[in-house]
Amino acid sequence: MAIPSRQIGWSTKANLLWQISKQLERLTCVTAGGCNTTTTTTTTISYYYYSGDNCISPLFSQIIRTTVSLSIGDVVLTDDGACYTINSTYVGPDYSVEYVSTETCFVDPCPTTTTTTTTAPLVNTNSTFVDCPGACDAGPCSQPYDYFDVWMTQECIDTFPTVGCVIWLDDKATIPFPNGSYNDGTGLGCIYITNGTITSTPPPVFTDTTFINCPGSCFIGCVVPYNYYSVYMSQACIDAWPTSGCEVWLDANATEPFPTGSYPGLTGCIEIENGVVI
């Protein structure tokens, strides 16, 4: 039988009897193994928050919520189906995606590109590239030959002179062989070198006496004495200037073309597009 609640206005004796009854009820519960009670427990989930970079689009980041402690550099799968690399911790509670797993993305981690360049070692040679004075096609060199002291790969030494081979003045490959047209030693041909590389065509030649530089409209005559542009062209283009198809460069390595435009000439306009006379 349940003990009723204590009422206001009870006598001292009634209050004393109620207290004794409550104590007996508690003792009975203990002796009987406990009374039926209802306990309500509230559990608060504790989250960690991180910032992560998307594996496919690294510039796209998300805030990631997780109950698992993660480390910087972990690659994790989130509930949006993407993998992210954890890059820093974040102060919540805002988040965009929720952590799912760290195992899935280990199979297909964030893509990385590794480029390995293997460079053949350079070999010193002073017995391959003949060094003799005179013009490129001036005839055979005097014997015994003098040789340039240079560095090349062994393949280029064995097949000298091969177009595309690079010739260096030092073993660290920092000083390319000077531009020029060099006698091949036999008098039968030339070795053309531009920016240290053997080419099939002569390197450009410096000239400041060919391409007139004067202000004004394209068809207005220039004032005498003429000023000239300092440029680089092939000797053939210098000799037959201006010829369509000729290339005009601002540097000896033929890397900086003369600006596109219309320029005054002695007999009319010289049209240049990306360094080429048209």
Image: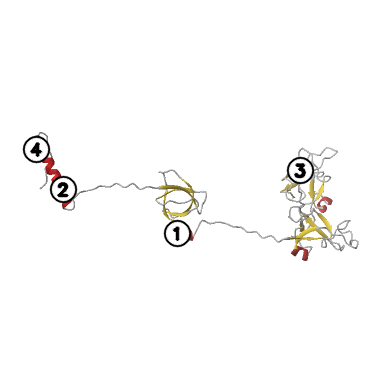
Q: Separation of disc 1 and disc 3 at Cα?
A: 65 Å
Nearer the observer: mark 1 or 3; the answer is 1
Q: Separation of disc 3 and disc 2 at Cα?
A: 115 Å
Q: Residue furthest bottom?
A: 158
What crowding class fits label 1: few (fewer than 14 Cα within 10 Å), some (14-19), or many (20 or more)? Answer: some
Q: Which residue is mark 2?
A: 27
Q: Residue furthest top?
A: 9
Image coords of residue 268 (percent x, y): 79, 44
Q: Which residue is mark 3?
A: 263
Q: Separation of disc 4 and disc 2 at Cα?
A: 20 Å
Q: Which residue is mark 1?
A: 104
Q: What amino acid is labelled 4 in the image?
A: Ala
Please give left or right for residue 213 compared with residue 1 in the image. right
Q: Separation of disc 1 and disc 4 at Cα?
A: 71 Å
Image coords of residue 197 (percent x, y): 76, 57
- 1 or 4: tag closer to the N-terminus: 4
Q: Quadrant of residue 216?
A: top right
- 4 or 2: tag closer to the N-terminus: 4
Q: Would you say the residues marked 1 and 2 are in contact, meaning their CB atoms lie under 8 Å apart?
A: no
Q: What amino acid is labelled 1 in the image?
A: Thr
Q: Would you say the residues marked 1 and 3 are in contact, meaning their CB atoms lie under 8 Å apart?
A: no
Q: What amino acid is labelled 2 in the image?
A: Leu
Please, what secondary structure does the residue beneath circle 3 have? Answer: strand
Image coords of residue 180 (percent x, y): 81, 54
Please, what secondary structure does the residue beneath circle 4 have? Answer: helix
Mark on residue 14? 4
Nearer the observer: mark 1 or 4; the answer is 4
Q: Is residue 151 visible?
A: yes
Q: Separation of disc 3 and disc 4 at Cα?
A: 122 Å
Nearer the observer: mark 1 or 2; the answer is 2
Image coords of residue 223 (percent x, y): 83, 37
